[in-house]
Amino acid sequence: ASAVYDDDMAVSELVTSSLPMETRFPPFQLRQLGGFWFPEAILPGVTAAHARFEPRPSDVFLASFPKSGTTWMKALAFAVAHRADHPPRSPGHPLRHRNPHDCVKFLEEPLAVDGGMLAALPSPRVIATHLPYSLLPGRVVAGGGSGVRIVYICRDPKDALVSTWLFAKKVVAAAAARDGDDGDDGKPPPPPTTFEEAFELFCDGRCTAGPQWRHVADYWEANQKLPDKVLFLRYEEMLMDPVANVRKLAEFMGCAFSGEEEAAGVARDIVDLCSIDALKNMEVNKNGTQEYVKNESFFRKGVAGDWSNYMTPAMAKRLDMIVEEAVQGRAEAT
Ligand code: A3P
């Protein structure tokens, strides 16, 4: 199950309507591909990535299960990669004027490959993805010899679920406010999924990029096999010691902080620039929007353990068990 999906032809020729569908977690109508669920709308982007994306050896990929710290990683990696041109304290720093999702694009978003957005970027490129390791294009994965480095960020699934559910509600509300429907078909917006429903679907792996535990375990195994090519970071550890993790990130990206930069506190400056409070208070993140949701929706609490405000201890135990059993089952199978 964890084999690399290196059959680019098969993905590039896939017929969406033939894939299993899940509609119970609006706003995203999901389709199942390679054992994972994805919003139908991104499948053309996945196809394009498999058919036409050209990796460069200097590329850095930021991979994550949704709502696990993607926005934070985008900001940090962008600030690290471009610190020579954009010192983190400079008033004109792009992150002070653009949302992290406008600074770093997803491989699978509609215009990334076919719109030439990624091809137009200067090297070194920082590119994000929610695709699991097994569904990355064969040319990208570490074993494929492309030289590409992959940074994975992992988060407690209970917090990722809570964050996903709250975010989905905001996306549905934004669509309803925008045009009075769900943005697709002129019908009234679907009723929001209750937390209990979202929990059941999540436990079944039926959510964007789910099952979450398989997403994490695939990257974990890749990190164990190829530690120079795949870095595995944890959201909770980054909260505890962001500076040490940014150092690790820079080193892995091939641009460790110099003695001079260390003395000048550049790592700390990057952490401060990318902190949730700093980003939340920037004008662009207070009032700007992405195509389908307000920028402010990407910055909520940014803490570990908020799940306890939404989940009963029994629910938490059940999800923990599902993850534990799945991970155990894999370990025994290998
Ligand atoms: P919460 O909803 O638990 O607060 P993603 O970026 O993958 O969509 O994940 C969103 C989660 O990351 C949200 O979690 C959000 O608040 C948190 N987040 C966003 N920016 C952050 C930052 N700079 N530092 C820490 N957490 C951040």
Image (spheres, rainbow, N blue to C red):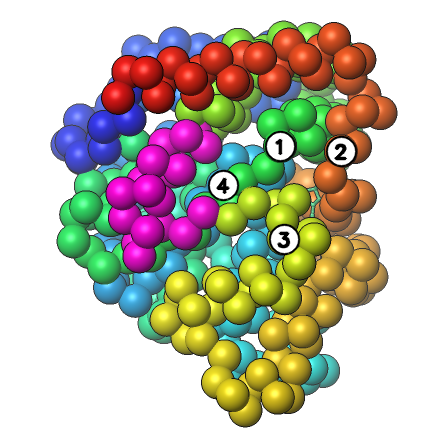
Please rate how many residues cluster around mark 3, counting C-alpha atoms within 10 Å: few if below 14, some from 14 to 19, many from 20.
some
Label 1 residue SS = loop
First in residue order: circle 2 vs circle 1 = 1
Residue placed under numbered mark 4 in the picture: 64
Would residue 156 be found to the left or right of residue 304 on screen? Answer: left
Label 4 residue SS = strand
Residue placed under numbered mark 2 in the picture: 305
Q: Does the residue labelled 4 lie within 8 Å of ligand 1?
A: yes
Would residue 154 be found to the left or right of residue 229 on screen? Answer: right
Residue placed under numbered mark 3 in the picture: 238
Residue type, mark 4 in image: Ser
Discs 4/1, front: 1
Q: What stretch is highlighted in magenta?
A: 215-232
Quadrant assignment for ligand 1: top right
Residue placed under numbered mark 1 in the picture: 156
Discs 4/2, front: 2
Q: Does the residue labelled 3 lie within 8 Å of ligand 1?
A: yes
First in residue order: circle 2 vs circle 3 = 3
**Contact flag, marks 4 and 1 (Cβ < 8 Å):** no
Q: Where is residue 283 in the image (x, y as percent from the top left)?
A: 80, 64
Q: Residue at x 42, y 24 (%)?
A: 214
First in residue order: circle 3 vs circle 4 = 4
Q: Residue at x 76, y 33 (%)?
A: 305
Q: Residue at x 80, y 24 (%)?
A: 308
Question: Foreground residue, 44 or 142?
Answer: 142
Does any portion of residue 29 appear in the rendered image?
no
Give me the C-alpha separation between circle 4 and circle 2: 19 Å
Please rate how many residues cluster around mark 2, counting C-alpha atoms within 10 Å: few if below 14, some from 14 to 19, many from 20.
few
Question: Foreground residue, 134 or 227?
Answer: 227
**Contact flag, marks 2 and 1 (Cβ < 8 Å):** yes
